[in-house]
Image (spheres, rainbow, N blue to C red):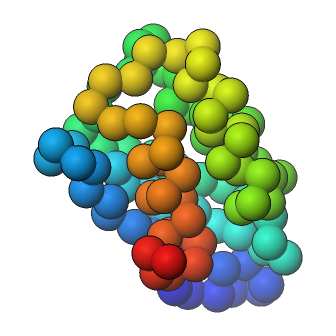
């Protein structure tokens, strides 16, 4: 995990049960998400919704991001992964570990 000017950077590759992958690249400062990018081989409809998810997480603390992700996927179709998988992948990227 890199740190520049108070901003920490983290990444994770999270394998979802069933074989799909969620990749996360996140920048955070003082416990808040500055920027996050999700990628992987999951399916989401509409496809451009991934950018909406990334945007709604900006400014959120890790602890509140779980509820934000759960709420977001109530209105977006997700195939090959679940909201909990996105949270776990984000958590690993921020904390640098699975626990």
Depicted 69 relative to depicted 30: above or below: above
Left or right side of 14 for 2? right
Q: Residue at x 60, y 19 (%)?
A: 74
Q: Residue furthest left?
A: 19
Q: Position of residue 52 (x, y in %)?
A: 63, 28
Residue 70 in view (yes/no): yes
Question: At x 70% / y 50%, what residue is drawn?
Answer: 65
Q: Nearer the viewer, residue 80 or 28?
A: 80
Q: Relative to 74, is 80 on the left or the right?
A: left
Q: How many marks?
A: 0
Q: Nearer the viewer, residue 91 or 6?
A: 91
Q: Quadrant of residue 31?
A: bottom right
**Residue 52 seen in render:** no
Q: Position of residue 46 (x, y in %)?
A: 45, 12
Q: Quadrant of residue 98?
A: bottom left
* Nearer the observer, 62 or 35: 62
Q: Residue at x 79, y 84 (%)?
A: 6
Q: Position of residue 21 (x, y in %)?
A: 25, 49
> Where in the figure is residue 85, as x and y percent of width and height?
42, 48
Q: In the rendered image of this protein, does residue 70 appear above or below residue 98?
A: above
**Residue at x 23% of width, y 38% of height:** 41
Q: Is residue 41 left or right of residue 57?
A: left
């Amino acid at each position: 995990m890199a740190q520049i000017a108070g901003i920490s950077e983290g990444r994770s590759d999270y394998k979802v049960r069933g074989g799909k992958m969620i990749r996360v690249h996140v920048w955070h400062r003082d416990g808040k998400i500055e920027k996050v990018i999700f990628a992987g081989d999951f399916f989401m409809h509409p496809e451009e919704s991934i950018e909406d998810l990334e945007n709604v997480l900006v400014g959120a603390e890790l602890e509140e991001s779980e509820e934000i992700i759960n709420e977001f996927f109530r209105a977006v179709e997700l195939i090959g992964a679940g909201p909990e998988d996105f949270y776990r992948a984000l958590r690993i990227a921020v904390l640098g570990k699975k626990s």
